[in-house]
Amino acid sequence: VKKYESKFTKAREYAGGFADVTFTDWFYEAVGSAYEFGLVNGSSNTTYEPDGTMTVAEAITLACRMYGVANGKTVDVKNGTVNWYDNYVAYAKNAGFLKDGDFDSYDREIKRYEMVTLFAKAIPAEAFAELNYVTHIPDVSNDKPYAKDILMFYNAGICMGNDIYGTFNPESNITRAEVAAIVDRIADHD
């Protein structure tokens, strides 16, 4: 695997502007950094809503942004004609990291395993260089179709589990704080 040269750059400054993200939160630095990379925004000008969830459509939109940067492509899509996300879905399908039937609805909350699988398809494999040696995740059976992607994220140091045992909770909805941590770790290899 060739060495991955991250194309993500910080284009704006985070000055601790979200009232619901404080310096004592585990996700404080991740939210600030992901914001500076232009990958996440607040739910308003003053709040981030870290415990909030993300929809499938929002995750696809974020995956499109990350795909564009990681591959040196411009992702210039306007809001869809029926749904705000239609053009992002079309872009993801044209780029090849989304297929018809991958999701039963774009409006529902996305599961943790679905987010990892989507990002694993959208980001070049070189971005997931192994830093760890993880062979087993307690709550992810190796026969699950998404097990390989989750192991790749663990071994790349992008996901680390929710407790001392390294559980992943694949069927749980992903929080906005967790999303910020994941995208920041993909964008910032340091």
Image: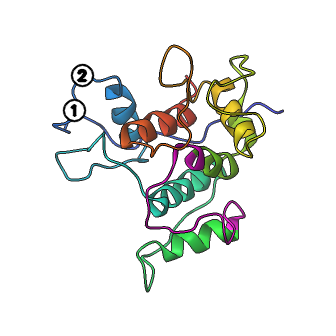
Q: Is 98 covered by the magenta stretch? A: yes
On the image, the x and y values in percent for residue 63 come to 55, 54
Read off the magenta span: 95-115
Q: Is 90 covered by the magenta stretch? A: no
On the image, the x and y values in percent for residue 83 come to 42, 79
SS under mark 2: loop
SS under mark 1: loop
Tell me: residue 81, above or below residue 59. Answer: below
Residue 98 is marked as: none
- Amino acid marked by disc 2: Phe
The quarter of the image holding the C terminus is top right
Q: In front: 57, or 71? A: 57
Tell me: residue 17, above or below residue 164. Answer: below
Q: In front: 134, or 32? A: 134
Q: Nearer the viewer, mark 1 or mark 2?
A: 2
Q: Main secondary structure of the magenta part?
A: loop
Q: Residue at x 48, y 19 (%)?
A: 163
Neighbour tally class for label 1: few under 14, some 14-19, many 20 plus, Cα within 10 Å:
some
Tell me: residue 130, above or below residue 173. Answer: above
Marks 1,2: beta carbons within 8 A: yes
- In the picture of the structure, the residue carrying the numbered disc 2 is 23
Neighbour tally class for label 2: few under 14, some 14-19, many 20 plus, Cα within 10 Å:
few
Q: Residue at x 57, y 36 (%)?
A: 186
- Amino acid marked by disc 1: Gly
The quarter of the image holding the N terminus is top right
- In the picture of the structure, the residue carrying the numbered disc 1 is 16
Q: In front: 101, or 127? A: 101
Specify the farthest residue to the top. 164
